[in-house]
Image: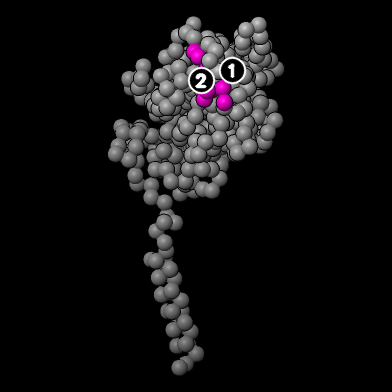
Amino acid sequence: MSRARGIAVMLAVLACGLIAAVVLWPARLVPDLRSGPATPNGPATPNGPAADGQPGAGSQPGAGSTGTGRPSWQWRVGGPELASRGIVVHYPASGRRRLPRVRASAYVIADAGTGQVLAAKDPHGEFPPASTLKVLTAVTLIPLLKPAAMVVASRRATSVQPNVVGLKRGRSYQVSSLFKALLLISANDAAVSLAEASGSFHRAIALMNAEAHWLQAYDVLAKDPNGLPAAHQHVSAYDEALIARQALAMPAFMKYDSTLAARFHLKRRKWVTLVNQNSLLMQYRGGIGGKIGWTDRARATYIGMARRHGVTLIVTILHARPLTEVTSGERLLNWGFAMDRKVRPVGRLVPPLPGGPPGR
């Protein structure tokens, strides 16, 4: 065989191998982006509710959070760019102010009034909520329970650990006092008592998940009312922003949540003082509410709300370095107030579904 013919044969073999590699490349490595809504703002389809477009190939779930088997439309709720697992932001051509570095796996900064998401990091990534889940608990149960009603603390409520406020089994507590304990000092026993006041513990969990679905917070799966570790319980930064926006629309929630301190009648001749754990209310100009959380697995989590000059911003942070969550929230809020109406939004907070949440 001549040298020229040998080279030709080798090139032919290499070409055939390359074609075979392309043809036989595993289909699972190429994301299917065809399911879900047919149009950017179209109606619900058999593959999921209305969403805003489709994510790119680099936006598929990775190893950083718990939910990797969700349908593709769920990653696109609020807009296709929100399917990103990294930071998404559109700086203006001039007057740029860079996002602060935040030691957290996920966050969202959004304008509650316009619904615009100004910037985000892994907004639909699923993470344990810790006590920020109590905002969903309150948003769900406040419309259902009369503030002056009395609730008898059960064995289940008084045995939860850590219990925080220290309810006494068999003693009656006012609903309004329990909500203050829930939101000011993150009382886990108060969360269980309020859940049971809805009819049963399990009914309350069903109502919370129904509330989340009505808000189109499809990344939420609640298993308990207090956010303590539970198998497969998760939220996303985007969905916590939806829940926070609903909380802002509820005067009763905001009254409880913004209370700096309150007295709690624990038992006969014993009162305790509840001091709000959300330092944003005391140290940040315009701070109006929020909730902190922490567990070993969730690390630090945070929801913050602030208002300046008629603009209300929401910040949500998940899986953050402990003891940095409030400071990080303040830095993101500072950026948001400086850049609101200057950056092109990366998505939007979708409205609740028509009608109302089941159970009301």
Position of residue 44 relative to residue 244, above or below, is below
Camera-nearest residue between 11 and 110: 110
Q: Is residue 307 left or right of residue 114?
A: right
Instruction: Examine the structure image and report whether residue 154 is included in the region drawn in magenta.
Output: yes
- Horizontal and vertical percent position of residue 155: 52, 23
Q: Is residue 356 left or right of residue 181?
A: left
Res 225 visible: yes
Q: Which mark is residue 342?
A: none
Residue found at x 46% / y 76%: 14
Q: Which mark is residue 154?
A: 2
Camera-nearest residue between 124 and 6: 124
- Horizontal and vertical percent position of residue 140: 45, 20
Instruction: Examine the structure image and report whether residue 60 is included in the region drawn in magenta.
Output: no
Residue found at x 38% / y 34%: 51
Res 79 visible: no
Q: Hey, what amino acid is under mark 1?
A: Leu
| Quadrant housing the N terminus | bottom left
Q: Residue furthest bottom?
A: 1
| Quadrant housing the C terminus | top left
**The magenta segment:** 151-159
Residue 79 sits in quarter: top left
Task: Identify the mark nearer the N-term, 1 or 2.
Answer: 2
Q: Which residue is mark 1?
A: 167
Q: Hey, what amino acid is under mark 2?
A: Ser
Residue found at x 62% / y 34%: 295
How far is the residue under mark 1 from the one under mark 2?
Answer: 9 Å
Q: Is residue 76 left or right of residue 228?
A: left
- Tell me the crowding category of disc 2: few under 14, some 14 to 19, or many 20 or more residues within 10 angstroms, Cα based: some
- Horizontal and vertical percent position of residue 35: 34, 44
